[in-house]
Image: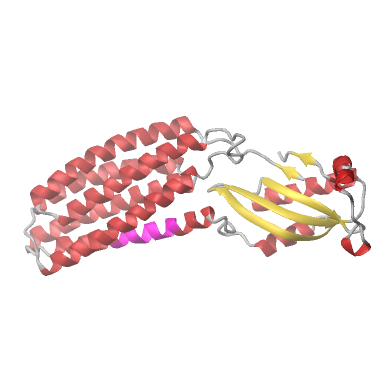
Amino acid sequence: MHVHATSPAQNSKRTGIVLRISLAATLAYVVVTFAAGLHAHSLALLSESGHNASDFLALLLSFVAVYFHNRPADNARTFGYQRTGVLAAFINAAALIVIALWIGAEAVHRLSNPVMVQPRLMMYVAAAGVVMNGAIAALLWKVAHDVNLRSAFIHMAGDTLSTAAVIAGGAGILATGKNWIDPALSLLIAALILWSSIGIVRETLNILLEGTPRGMALPQIRAGMERVEGVINVHDLHVWSLGSNSRALACHVTIADIPPSESACILIKLNHVLRDHFHISHTTIQFEHIGCGELEGCVVPIEEMAHDSGQTYHHGHAH
């Protein structure tokens, strides 16, 4: 039995506008921050430039992923392009981990060899960054429905916090004259990048490897299905994610040797439980009749299976 329901499509037009605005603003800020970092000899600003450059890549990947995500399924890609967003998030997070390690290594070097910085320029540029990153994060929050856009939101929100820290660092250098504050601040930014990126890598890898979705337990799903009247047991149960917001299930369900019309009622009840209690809308359920098992020597020729398939398998859509 094969049941498929399509979840409501995201407002791709609105998401596309938000991502275009975010891309333009982020690219402009990357250029300004990089130039200011060189002029002020500030590793904190240069690390912010690198962080924002990675966010520009994240937003670009997200934009491409949104485009492909909404393309319909075809004969070559029967599940469509639902995992493009997941793949984009994985690539982005992996790139961020590399950048965080580079920033950390450079910061450690500068701690032993401090460089004179211009704290006022640091603070001015960082203040502009707080406004820009905060505005972009707020826009992304409204459209962050999946792991792809959520990863972009997390990075922009992290940028807002780290850029605010640059302002505090600039004020600290201005007040004390201690230039080691700049690389120390960079270490904190690198740790923030690393922490957020590792979490996204773990989540996206679980989806790409078709692991059980986060927060779901197979024993609970099996128990819920076996409570349906007419179900004797559930086995060969598999649950995985098609995308960040789309889950699929495949299993075998043992029932009594009953007429097809009665088994169709059981199918409807099973899909009701899976949809309403576990948010699983794409299911493939194979019924096995307890009165016709291998122990009784119930072997049906392939020709008869093909001829009687209409009585054994039912196709429907869960709404």
The secondary structure that most of the magenta stretch takes on is: helix
Q: Is residue 102 left or right of residue 92?
A: left
Q: Is residue 167 visible?
A: no
- Quadrant where the N terminus lies? top right
Work out whether residue 16 or residue 167 is closer to the camera in this orientation and state it: 16
The region drawn magenta spans 191-201
- Quadrant where the C terminus lies? top right
Residue beneath the point at 38% across and 36% down: 19
- Which colour assignment does the render follow? secondary structure
Pinpoint residue 250: horizontal percent, then vertical percent.
70, 52
Q: Is residue 184 left or right of residue 87?
A: left
Pinpoint residue 134: horizontal percent, then vertical percent.
31, 45
Q: Compared to 55, does 114 lie above or below?
A: below
Q: Is residue 204 left or right of residue 1?
A: left
Residue beneath the point at 86% across and 40% down: 310
| Residue 215, quarter of the rendered image | bottom right
Work out whether residue 121 or residue 62 is closer to the camera in this orientation and state it: 62
Q: Is residue 20 left or right of residue 12?
A: left
- Whether residue 38 appears in magenta in the rendering, the answer is no
Pinpoint residue 195: horizontal percent, then vertical percent.
36, 61
In this figure, what is the number of numbered marks?
A: 0
| Residue 194, quarter of the rendered image | bottom left
Pinpoint residue 150: horizontal percent, then vertical percent.
43, 48
Q: Is residue 1 visible?
A: yes
Residue lying furthest bottom in this view? Answer: 112
Residue beneath the point at 13% across and 46% down: 36
| Residue 33, quarter of the rendered image | top left
